[in-house]
Amino acid sequence: ADEAATDAADAGTLSEGSPDPAAPVEDVEASDATGNAPSRDAVADSKNRAWDAGTVRADHAETAVEFADFWGEHDLDFSPASLSRLDDLVDAEWDDDRFAETAFGSDASFDDRAFTSVVRELGGYFGEVLARQLDGEWTDETDHEAAVVVGGPAGEFAVPVFEVAVTSLRTQAVFGRSYDALLEDLGRDGPTR
């Protein structure tokens, strides 16, 4: 029993050179030894970030991480390339007519609530890609429920991430194309798909 207690106590102790698991994980330019692809460790760490509680980002980022974990077989790793996989997921799981008669943010029906939930998950994921890859900032100080503000040489844009999700569910999945268009509109380079 004493050995188990000692092992449990030691499990919480950091050895010299070990990272502090309570410290926020920094955004890392993830690459393997060749500098070409994200390492599995970097991808796993990116899903376990810490956010300041009670912030606009925290509300949506936690939802995005849970969504990415739930759909793990689609390799939703918050990279720009994952937006093509997100488009494929939307096309495979939800047909265009599924939410045709629903209202985002409404509690009037089960379908309205389901639609709102899916839009928040998809939009949250898209917003987190923008936040992590393009240094975007979540805000609720726009005409939209939430947006991610991204800047570049051509100025700043508030991306209405939930509207992109609504369009993706009701007509055609456009997360990847929206990201590409944003880079072009901003006049900046960034991680590409």
Image (cartoon, grey):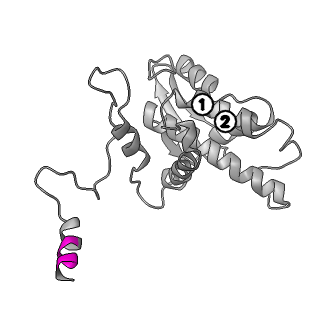
- The residue indicated by pointer 2 is 89
Q: Position of residue 189 (x, y in %)?
A: 44, 18
- Which residue is at a point 55% across and 48% down the rendered structure image? 64
Task: Identify the residue shown where x is 76% and y is 28%.
Answer: 172
Q: Is residue 145 visible?
A: no
Left or right: 22 in relation to 119: left
Q: Are marks 2 and 1 in contact (CB under 8 Å)?
A: yes
Percent x, y for residue 86? 62, 34
Left or right for 99, reference 148: right
Q: Quarter of the image containing the N terminus? A: bottom left
Check disc 2 and report its element: helix, strand or loop. helix
Establish if 161 lies above or below 54: above
Q: Can you say whether 37 is above or below 112 in the image?
A: above
Q: Given the current orientation, which residue lies at the most extreme bottom position?
A: 1
**For residue 159, what is the image quadrant?**
top right
**Label 1 sits on residue:** 85
Q: In whole angstroms, how far apart are the C-alphas of marks 2 and 1?
A: 6 Å
Residue 169 shown left or right of residue 8 in the figure: right
Q: Nearer the viewer, residue 172 or 181?
A: 172
Q: Amino acid at mark 1?
A: Arg
Tell me the element at label 1: helix
